[in-house]
Amino acid sequence: MTPFRAKKAAYYITRAVGIHIPPGVFRSLRDKHGRLARADERRVEERVDYYNKLAGSVSLDSNATDLRGLLRERKTTYFYDLYEIARYFDPRVKFSYVFGDVREVPPYPAFVKSRPIAGDNANSVLMKLNKIRHFNFVNDAYPSEKKKNALVWRGRFSQKPNPRRMFVEKYMGKPGFDVGRINTGYAMPGLDRPFMPVRGQLKYKFILSLEGIDVASNLKWIMSSNSIAFSQPLKFETWFMEGTLIPGVHYAELKDDFSDIEEKMEYYNSHPREAKEIVENAHRYVDRFLNPAVERKIALLVFEKYLEKTGQAG
């Protein structure tokens, strides 16, 4: 069993056991999660307001559910992650959610994993959902100067025209690029390459992060590594607050047609100090998501704000 599969198995086992603990136990503990160091308080408040942008009084969707309704969604990671927070509140309160890869802003306030960065996205209230897949960080044993002077990417895409396919068709087989599609049940000759685990990708100086349906799940672990994340302009965000990432500071931003990718690779090869600064900035950015107690507290406050703005007491 791979480390990820073992982690996922442990995730489901612990959540399946936890679901049988009466929610009342967690409601009695909610206030104890409120104690934070003063230095954390402002950062927590800023993140709560970023995730939950609801202002004034807002109306619930007529099909909003409660804790009992949420329980019908059991067996998905989205359910377990939202239930972990909802169980701290009165089981009668109502809320909405949209599970899966969300690209559009719902017409009513709802908890989502992802939302568009641009435009009015207030109805999309971000919650840390499907975190077993999206929130994986690494301890990179390879210093930048010992990494391969090349860019790597492995991922999935369909036969329809899309940015991922466009990139692989353009750069597969070129010197300095180790890229390709992972076969997902049907072959695409000339584009498919063998699966490469994260530990293999960490040997490369540059790692490409390409959004698919919504966010790219690999951006988070790339930014915790000693490699530089390369990405097109970001269009979607999650609990990782991708909308606050700064090109040239946290990652190397590419044109939508990738026409500047070789230029960017050469630039960071010839400017090692700037390359190191990007890696260090990325590490500092990742650090804010590594404290489980703070992460839980923020999620509780996001949920609590949702209840306040929809006229409910939790």
Image (tube, helix red, strand yellow):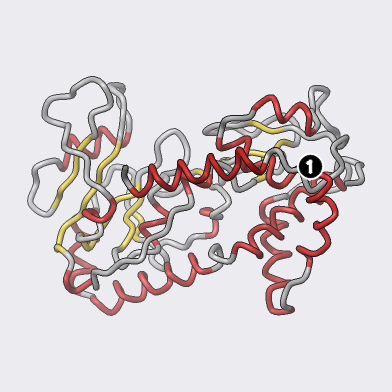
Q: Is residue 258 above or below residue 286?
A: above
Report the front residue among 285 and 292.
Answer: 292
Which residue position holds label 1?
Answer: 22
Residue 165 in sight from this viewpoint: yes
- Left or right: residue 127 versus residue 256 is right
Identify the residue at image location x=64%, y=46%. 127
The quarter holding residue 104 reads top right
- Left or right: residue 112 versus residue 154 is right
Q: Is residue 17 above or below residue 175?
A: above
Disc 1 crowd, CA 10 A, few/some/many (<14, 14-19, 20+): few
Residue 307 x/y as whole percent: 84, 44
Identify the residue at image location x=71%, y=57%. 48
Task: Look at the image and tell me in which quarter the N terminus lies.
Answer: top left
Residue 148 x/y as whole percent: 14, 63
Residue 120 in sight from this viewpoint: no
- Left or right: residue 136 versus residue 62 is left
Q: Is residue 284 above or below residue 214?
A: below
Residue 292 x/y as whole percent: 60, 62
**Disc 1 secondary structure class:** loop
Identify the residue at image location x=25%, y=46%. 153
Report the front residue among 142 and 161.
Answer: 142
Give the residue type that dot 1 points to. Pro
- Left or right: residue 214 versus residue 41 is left
